[in-house]
Image: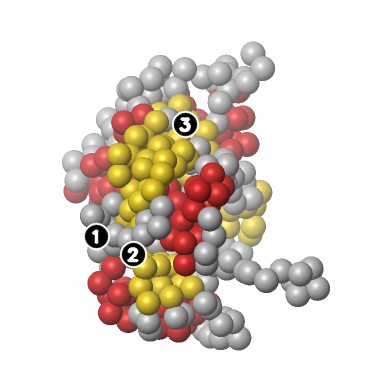
Amino acid sequence: MLDAGNDIVVMEATSHGLAQSRVRNCRFRVAIVTNVTSEHLEFHGTLEAYRAAKAMLVEEAPIAILNADDPAFGYFRDRARDRVVTSGTDASAEVRASDIQARADGTTFTATTLTWAGEVHLQLPGAFNVHNALAALALAEVEGVDLAAAARAVGTVSGVPGRMERIDAGQPFGVVVDYAHTADSLAKMLRTLRPLTAGRLIVVFGSAGERDRVKRPAMGKVAAELADLAVVTDEDPRLEDGHAINEAIAEGAREAGGRDGTDLWVIDDRRAAIAHAIGLAQAGDMVLLAGKGHEGSMFYANEKRWWDEREVARQELAAAGFKADA
């Protein structure tokens, strides 16, 4: 990077990396925390330990950009080393969004900072992308970047593979692939897609083996409450019994009112689960394929198998009679 003349690096620092001191040779000038939910508890043990690992960023960096809308905001604000810059929709946020207009193909909002105000046009739908854009604008402001230029720049981002990615094969219903793999992220995706869906909202998802077990029934509960139809399936079972994982998820859905064979199905084979969801879909419906996103493999025991959620979705759409060039 030095040889290439780089003078700024934007880096994701994972909770694992922080807890294991893998980034101790980095000195962060600005720390950005978007939100923190129950995740990676198989490693950290408790939510408190997970948050404490994340807090190492704001304890070190002289500037912390924090999401004022996030329930964990106070926790990180109290641990910040020095300057805190707030972003969000809260009226007290220093970089805030108002007049948010959500569309299927993006989002428009008015951004107001300490030095600038103007419209931001995102190609990305979802409230979480508004928060991400606000964090980026806050970083631009503290680094002295022209805010109008920064607003134009975030508007050029067309999306990340496997994140809210639409699959279009000419079918009369929507298919979206996303990496959402926690109860919180799944809820956000379902809430984002609901107003964009004329018919029923169908979700296909699972939970990884040898990872946080607490989130499994919580994810089932979210699916039962926020989707119309839910198909629970494999997502990297690893050395665990995949069916047992899926049943733990389904039990959370059943406790929230999910009914087997009516609005809830457990289909361990992920391809068969996707095919089932496509078979259920009618004109105006929306199918969310959650959890795998951009990943190119699936782990069963010690075996790494090919998997591309987007390609499998296209294949199953074609098998159902839908082809992009038809």
Most extreme residue toward the right is 3
Secondary structure at numbered mark 2: strand
Quarter of the figure that contains the C terminus: top right
Residue to which mark 3 is pinned = 105
* Residues tagged 3 and 2 counted as in contact (Cβ below 8 A): no
Answer above or below: position of 106 versus 136.
Answer: above
Residue nearest the viewer, comparing 290 with 209: 290
Residue nearest the viewer, comparing 65 with 204: 65
Say left or right for 94 vs 13: left
Q: What is the total number of numbered labels drawn onto the structure image?
A: 3
**Residue type of the residue flagged with mark 2:** Thr
Q: Where residue 260 sits in the image (x, y, percent)?
A: 28, 37
Residue to which mark 2 is pinned = 86
Residue to which mark 1 is pinned = 92
* Residues tagged 2 and 1 counted as in contact (Cβ below 8 A): yes
Secondary structure at numbered mark 1: loop
Residue name at image x 23 percent, y 45 percent:
254
Residue 207 has which mark? none
Residue name at image x 50 percent, y 37 percent:
123
Measure how far apart labels 3 and 2 are at the Cα level.
27 Å
Q: Nearer the viewer's eye, disc 3 or disc 1?
A: 1
- Disc nearer the start of the sequence (3/2): 2
Say left or right for 70 vs 286: left
